[in-house]
Amino acid sequence: MQRDVTKPFAFILKAQDGRARLGEIAMPRGRIRTPAFMPVGTAATVKAMLPETVRATGADIILANTYHLMLRPGAERIAKLGGLHRFMGWDGPILTDSGGYQVMSLSKLRRIQEHGVTFQSHIDGATHLLTPERAIEVQCLLGADIQMVLDECTPFPATHDEARSSMELSMRWAERSKQAFQSMAAPGQALFGIVQGSIYPDLREQSAGVLQDVGFDGYAIGGLAVGEGQEAMLDTVTLTTSVLPEDRPRYLMGVGTPQDMLAAIARGIDMFDCVMPTRSGRHNQAFTWGGRLNLRNARYADDQSPLDAESACPAAKYSRAYLHHLVKSGEVLGAMLLSWANVHFYQELIARAREAINGRAFAAFAEDVTRRYSASNGGEEE
Amino acid sequence: MQRDVTKPFAFILKAQDGRARLGEIAMPRGRIRTPAFMPVGTAATVKAMLPETVRATGADIILANTYHLMLRPGAERIAKLGGLHRFMGWDGPILTDSGGYQVMSLSKLRRIQEHGVTFQSHIDGATHLLTPERAIEVQCLLGADIQMVLDECTPFPATHDEARSSMELSMRWAERSKQAFQSMAAPGQALFGIVQGSIYPDLREQSAGVLQDVGFDGYAIGGLAVGEGQEAMLDTVTLTTSVLPEDRPRYLMGVGTPQDMLAAIARGIDMFDCVMPTRSGRHNQAFTWGGRLNLRNARYADDQSPLDAESACPAAKYSRAYLHHLVKSGEVLGAMLLSWANVHFYQELIARAREAINGRAFAAFAEDVTRRYSASNGGEEE
């Protein structure tokens, strides 16, 4: 699919069921049905999957990591090679994070100052400076369709003072990001702001207000799923979505489990990303309609049943016995099949969530899945 | 494809070009065009490839390893789960080796006696006994379409006396294997004998004679590509094929490079297996029509050209720059794409060899490929 710039970024709300929203983002590289789950393609690959396989699971958009790509192979190199879409063979929309989160979680010797963050690469120790302007420049070099402002992911726990100071820095960076975006981005590209403020309602509200004054194509909620627990996370989501505009997509970054996603959809979230389906797939874990399974468990050695009889994924048709054998033997195919089945499950989950919203039956759907995932023997094993 | 037992094992010779042969093996699970290259699916998976992808490269048959499968997940278990084809999702013919070679190369504390070989598993140290009868029983439990007699892979170098004594043991085991096969095998399954005798012409000739007296569906040449060098290997192939029957397929075990396969085809070999395309693919190496490439080499970092412009393989359409990035980053997708491209190359190579034999142009074809693979900058890098 070529970029069609006569189709600029637009968000259409199609139905609501309680606070759950069904919508569609139109973009030059195609539409994104919401609620949307974005598989994570960290280093320009959704790990252990072919791009056409990712597409076939039902993914409309993937996420790639600015931090990883700026370090290796380098944003200027990818630009010279024709951009990220061509580089990795994915022709749909790509959202890139700003690199801020990985700078905090992966890099060494980071130092945050007003102008930006200085850090050492986790790959070769080289020193890099990431400013709001450079974060946008990198995302433009990659050719990202949806770009994110540079923010500081406030660590948890943080005092109110720490959280306010961190949030305010992120808000100043958000404004600089917007200015840089306006001077650098191509027609049809979009920029999302990121609400910060830890678990403090007043700070979240204040952050959402500042971002709306600056004006963004969509609004993300950052700084969650970092140890605050599900209740605090959902409370913050409830509060934050209530102060975000209705006519813009809302993206809960880095979330999550099937249960967390459904709970967040019920609170008005439209977009998600998470490494869970692929990372779990490389660690013998499967998400199925019957719950989560650990294929390394000896109980599957003679189990002829398919991984997930309820799934339409070709990978889920392999027997549990075969998958057990593959993971016990350390075979690459085990990681390939489980990653595929998991991404497919996440896409099926989100597609059924969309159907349920459309049919005004979301609450019952969410309850059913949540029950399957918390049942003692269908829930998370081990 | 279901087994069609109205199509028993049959070998049809269709054309000859010098000593190179074009043929077809008919079997209950489908035909095998010869010369044939069999990708190796050691532990019930052609490493890092989906079965449907292996099939799409043009492979008619794959090889699986008796040694690995009897140890994990166990032959009785696979039988209980419906056999190897169902277990791994491959519906074409499967050839299994007898386990003899891996016992020599992988196991610990092996002891060869007249009745069989006792060894310790390389996985858990458990003691196992492999006899000619058990090797056939295991292959029947797996449901292998083409089975191999248990043999001792004579180490290289070996004195004439050592080689004779080893070969004679293998011949006694071959006869016992045949008897066991006759009492256990299903209709349409086939058994191949294995010629041994190291690099000694008189022993090879004697071995080929004994095997023909016993009578097999096909004849393999074992004990080569173990350090004797290309010249000695090809001399042995030339001699051995000249004393094998015309109306049975001939299989050169564990070979090899594109050059070695073409040289062996020119000497009357019909079947090959080798881990090289998949193992190389997991170690950054690509086989292309321009020669062998090491994708880790920095020269490819900015190389926009496809892996192999001359290949029809979807994996070969990715840029060298992207593949370089994947292998540098240790991404699973690098191993997936290179394994796929390499197996595809091997199948294209063998398909073009068949066409060349049919067109009586094999010598020129083999010379062209051999030249590409020995040219200084198109040959094996590093």
Image (tube, coloured by chain):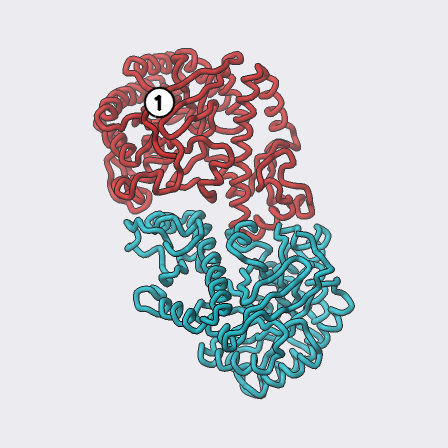
Chain colours: A cyan, B red
Residue indicated by mark 1: B9
| Amino acid at pointer 1 | Phe
Q: Residue at x 52, y 40 (%)?
A: B340
Identify the chain of the residue marked 1, using the numbered disc in the image: B
Q: Is mark 1 on a helix, strand or loop?
A: loop
- A333 or B127: nearer the eye? A333
Question: In the orientation shown, which residue stands out farthest toward the front?
Answer: A359
- A302 or A284: nearer the eye? A302
List x then y, in percent, for residue B6: 33, 24
Quarter of the image containing the N terminus of chain B?
top left
Q: Which residue is drawn at 67% across and 71% down?
A: A217
In the rendered image of this protein, does residue A70 appear above or below residue B129?
below
Q: Specify whether A248 is left or right of B77.
A: right
Quarter of the image containing the C terminus of chain B?
top right
- B363 or B235: nearer the eye? B363
List x then y, in percent, for residue B300: 66, 44
List x then y, in percent, for residue B54: 47, 38
Asked if one can make out residue A331 in the rendered structure from this viewpoint, the answer is: yes
- Classify residue A114 by image quadrant: bottom right
Q: Which residue is drawn at 62% across and 56% down?
A: A92
State the count of labels.
1
- B16 or B24: nearer the eye? B24
List x then y, in percent, for residue A54: 53, 53
Q: Specify whether B353 is left or right of B246.
A: right
Asked if one can make out residue B232 in the rendered structure from this viewpoint, the answer is: no
